[in-house]
Image (tube, helix red, strand yellow):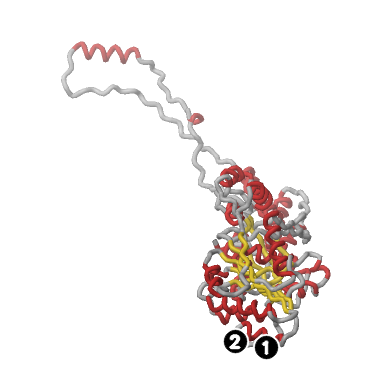
Amino acid sequence: MEPFLVWMGVNRKRMSLSYELRVLELDSQTQLLERMQLLTQFASNFVVVKGEAGAGKTWLAHRFLEAWSHDKNQSLVTCLANQEDEVNRGNILRQLFPQSMYSTTDSLNDSVERILEGESCNIVIVVDNAHHASQALLAELWLLFTAAQHTPKQNISIVLFTASDSVSSKLSRLSHGMEAKPVELDVDELSDAEAEQFFDSLVLRYLDESVEKRIKSAFTNTRPLPGEILALGEHKVEKKVIIRSLVGSPAKIAATIAVILLLLFLGYRWLLQSPKPSVEPLEPVSSEQTVIPTLDQPQDAATLEQAEKANREMPDDLTATDDSLALPPAVTSETASVGEAESGERVVITSDVVDALLEDKTDIAAEKATEIQQAVDSAKASDAQQANIPPQETVVDVEVTEALQTPITFSFARDQLNALPSNSYTLQIAAMTEMEDVQMFLNQHTFDKPIRVYPTLRGEEKWYIVTYDNFPSIQSARDAADNLPSEIKSLGPWPKAMSQVKREIERWAE
């Protein structure tokens, strides 16, 4: 399920690292968050938030902890199918009491009671995908809630987000005969106005003009659920073929085109200066007299008379005429070679340079760029010397040279990020659309913790996300963001759930 909250870095200039964080919070969702805050603010409560798939429950869970419960000790867990209860207990206790000793085999109530020893607390535990939680885990959470109601100065609230009614039936059996009952809230569909606002702000403004009309038509038949509306922007569309350089950047495109044009110019010049083929005259045809063949068969007198009359009328000056100028020119044995100068020298670009340009290996291309330029200069100097003309000065494109000398040294950390716990957090410190920008960002800053970069797709556009370290809770991630250098804090680093990171990595693989 996709969240409502869209964090998007807006790159005002290509090399700019200033990003604006944008949040869309609808009125209906704000009202629901206010009720959740009111229920958990002053006393312990057990809240169940129900909604179908795509209603935005995951976004509500994260948004509630980030903006509506700042003063509480927080814990966020996501239940998975067939997940052991010991894993969920460990995730809850590690986020609430990172410095304390506990055993994941003990119940939550026993561990919390032993750690607190009757001291006051203000705790909220949020469980996403609670329909995957076992009956035993729900019983432990209910017991923890009821025990806090009878302990002075302890406020422990449980908030479950579920997509089915199975949790309500299990809790009804646990609360049977008791005064305390769970509070149920429903996540409704968006109104028409909210759905239109959501579509315009988070989908339509990021679409390409070629698919805008088709997506608008699909929106009219889409249910007013945030998840289904966001899915419209991720539909696969037919891409237009765009003629771009094989090496990517505009500077590299210009360098490649310059080399090709130079080779074509040298070849065309050689063709103009090549010698014209000579035409040898044909020998004159000797004079011959036209003879009318005679037949072996006997001829009558009339036939003989006609033959004699024709011989008398034929002119005597029968001579051959030389029409060799009307014939096509003779075929020459010389061949034309593109790139070959009149002196016989040739400008050659080796195959490893061509392969480097095709595979975007700029370091190899940069090493060979000087060699290519020297070969071209040598050919120009040879032509100028033959024509008694001083050689022209060679102009070196500084931007092209710098672009070819900026190799990409970082690698994607998708496997490392997928290996981290899904219930942990990281800090997103930058998001860029060009790998060169990511490399320059890493070259400009030094970090004392691991920096991991992963690619993702937002709509049809490629993004490269830069993350900082890994944290067991959202609060520890916020504390780490406050301790970053001022130039990094100015970019607005923010905590990001590892489960969201993994979903974005899977989006790139698709």
**Mark 1 residue crowding within 10 angstroms, few (<14) / some (14–19) / many (20+):** few
**Mark 2 residue crowding within 10 angstroms, few (<14) / some (14–19) / many (20+):** few
Q: Secondary structure at mark 2?
A: loop
**Farthest left residue in view:** 298
- Relative to 244, say whether 44 is above or below: below
- Relative to 95, say whether 47 is above or below: above
**The C terminus lies in quadrant:** bottom right
Q: Which quadrant holds residue 485?
A: bottom right
In the image shown, does 155 or 507 lie closer to the viewer? 155
> Residue 261 location, x and y as percent?
66, 49
What residue type is disc 1 on? Arg
Q: Which quadrant holds residue 437?
A: bottom right
Q: Which mark is residue 504?
A: none
Q: Do residues under tags 1 and 2 come within 8 Å of each other at their CB atoms?
A: yes
Give the Cα separation between the discs numbered 1 and 2. Answer: 11 Å
Which residue is located at x 52 percent, y 72 percent? 81
Q: Secondary structure at mark 1?
A: helix
In the image shown, does 279 or 394 lie closer to the viewer? 394
Q: Is residue 154 left or right of residue 227?
A: right
In the image shown, does 23 or 377 lie closer to the viewer? 23
Disc 1 target residue: 114
Which residue is located at x 51 percent, y 30 percent? 325
- Relative to 79, say whether 460 is above or below: above
> Residue 269 location, x and y as percent?
65, 46
Disc 2 target residue: 106
What residue type is disc 2 on? Asp
